[in-house]
Image (cartoon, helix red, strand yellow):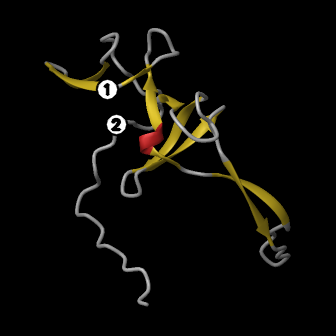
Amino acid sequence: MPSKVKLPRPARPPKCHVRTGDKIVVLSGAAKGKTGTIIKVFPFEQRALVEGDAAIYDTKHVKPNPQAGVEGGRVQRLRPIHLSKLALLDPTTNKAATRPRRIRTDKGVVRTARKSGHALVAAK
């Protein structure tokens, strides 16, 4: 049986509904219903790193390397979450999940919440 075939990477990254600094709520999984802030988005992998209550950690066992100054033991690392499990928080209530809408203005394209119509500003 042949090994897994890697698909070629697309020329441009797919569209993402979230950006770095957005406040989000997790829709499914172990952290369902918890909120957090996006640290980094990986558009080609369709994943994002989240900090706060919604953060999920992996434990990695590290071998000590005195020459490099690395101490051995268990290290907690953030695990990326798939973008389909994340929804933006409505800026008015900070409770309900909302979808972004892009509205063209004289200043440029502005993201707004579909439920309340308020602008979504990512805190960087």
* Picture layout, residue 65 above or below residue 84: below
Whether pointer 2 and pointer 1 mark residues with C-beta atoms closer than 8 Å, the reply is: yes
Bin the neighbour count of mark 2 within 10 Å (Cα to Cα): few under 14, some 14-19, many 20 and up: some
Label 2: element kind = loop
Residue 102 place in picture, x, y as percent: 22, 26
Hey, which residue is sitting farthest front in the picture? 1
Q: Is residue 94 left or right of residue 68?
A: left
Residue 71 place in picture, x, y as percent: 85, 66
Residue 72 place in picture, x, y as percent: 85, 68
Q: Real-space Cα distance between discs 2 and 1?
A: 7 Å
Bin the neighbour count of mark 1 within 10 Å (Cα to Cα): few under 14, some 14-19, many 20 and up: many
The quadrant in which the N terminus is found is bottom left
State the residue position of label 2. 17
* Picture layout, residue 66 above or below residue 53: below
Report the residue at 50% width, 29% height from top: 24
Q: Is residue 109 left or right of residue 99?
A: left
Tag 1: residue type?
Pro
